[in-house]
Image: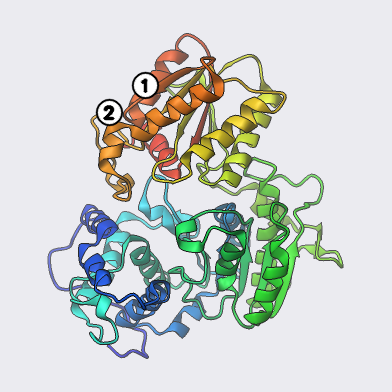
Amino acid sequence: MSETTQQPLESEMRTPRSYKDAINCLNSLQSNFASIEAMKKLGPNVNRNELSINEVFEFTRRLGYKPTDFNKLNIIHVTGTKGKGSTCAFTESILKQYQPNYISKIGLYTSPHLKSVRERIRINGQPINEDKFAKYFFEVWDKLSSTTSDPIQWPTLQPSDQVKPMYFKYLTVLSFHVFLQEGIDTAIYEVGVGGTFDSTNIIAKPTTTGISALGIDHTFMLGDTIESITENKTGIFKKGSPAFVSKQTEYPETHELIRARAKELEVSSLEFVNPDLPQGIKLGLSGDFQKANATLAIRLAISHLKAIGVDKDLPELNEDGSIKSLSDKFVSGLANVDWPGRCQVIKNKPGYENITWYIDGAHTIESINASSSWFKQEQLKNDKGKRKVLLFNQQGRDNYRDLLAKLYQVVSESQPSIEFSDVIFTPNVTWSSGEYNAELLSKNTSEDAVKKLEIQHDFSNQWKDLDGDKAKRHVFPDIETSINFLKSESEREQLEVFVCGSLHLVGGFLVVLDNDRD
């Protein structure tokens, strides 16, 4: 296939392979032995970050695409430490209001997923179906198995028929293929980690770029200072494209560096977005902190719509760039956004009528602070003396104790305080059989530590140090056992349950709550 001509890919002639087969192949890429062995052979002078992003260009070349092909997707590119996923969801919901007159198909690529990996690749608000996922997955798989990379230029991609992109990189490459084959004319891409070297950062001409709230996370890749993290995340800025950045209330010192990076990377304009919304605007996502994500999404959507030639039904801005008034389409988009697992409240679930669930994925100090504050506000607003329970996990993060300490500080130490009657710590294992749903399997944590419940027992001991014996502490081996315990307890009295921590916990929790077995 020519490198300069985009053509549909064809799978090898063989018995059709199933969606389950695709998931099994995808999971094998979490610990891609061939790729890891090739990386080990690199010398000490090789910049692995630079190599990683260059490999994405090479993999897409082998699929028959050139970088300029992605420009036709009209991509909005978004990064940040917290809120970037919610910002993308708000942006998508707004832009859906402009279909079909101005936009034909909207693609959304986000990570991680909650229940199904198909959530990461959405078209017009819906995850692609299993048949399409399998079809496109194996088109990419087979093409990469039957094409080669120059062994001198690409030693890490040898042998070419065996080395595949690692899990996230594969899904990113797959998303570009899906969106091009499906005729997407507006796409929203959420960065996975960082910016400069993220797999999504092969986009040459985004219609606009955005950065949500910054914080300290992924320090092993991005550095352990807010300056190094900011420098990496601003790497999505592109020459000639406008950039919008949420005002960094927690790290205002980053503004100067962001301005310098915008100048260095020659963006067409840079604006810091004020988080204020016009009065009376309803957001479909709970939590005061969502206002900043919503206002960033508004500015990204306006910029994008103008870039694709839309000049009607747009919000009115004040001279300083703040939002004066919103058009009906924007109001509807903000109100109707759907983003499960983020400040989500579930009431009257059949079988769990006596439990109100408060669910939020949070994996940084900043996001734990926001999540805990949201739960506390909900309790103070609706508190009728009901029993409160915490279900928590964070697996595989070096600062996991700091995260639980922050949650305790926000909920229990600052006045007025909220007290839990019980705290439950569980790994992300889905079922009481010890099995995971296939799409929830993670090979990036120590299997031995999970089986021994090492982190969960550490959490339990830490809570005792923080809270004494005020709350009953429970360590359960899986999410199903945890939920069954709560269901049993709710037969005696009403419960308010805060499910917080890893998005892997949140995803597994939602799967068990819906009894959605493989």
Can you identify the residue that label 1 sits on?
A: 484
Asked whether disc 1 touches disc 2, contact meaning CB atoms under 8 Å apart, the reply is yes
Tell me the amino acid under the disc marked 1: Asn
Other-residue count near label 2 (Cα within 10 Å), few / some / many at <14 / 14–19 / ≥20: some
Can you identify the residue that label 2 sits on?
A: 432
Q: Which mark is residue 177?
A: none
Q: Which of the image's four quarters has the C terminus?
A: top left
Q: Position of residue 63 (x, y in %)?
A: 31, 79
Vertical placement of residue 272 versus 55, above or below: above
**Which residue lies at the image location 46% right of the left edge and 71% below the top edge?**
197
* Residue 264 in which image quadrant: bottom right
Q: Position of residue 403 (x, y in %)?
A: 53, 39
**189 with respect to 370 (left or right):** left
Nearer-the-camera pick, 107 or 493: 493
Residue 314 seen in render: no
Vertical placement of residue 497 versus 162, above or below: above
Q: Position of residue 496 (x, y in %)?
A: 55, 22
Residue 73 seen in render: yes
* Residue 256 in which image quadrant: bottom right
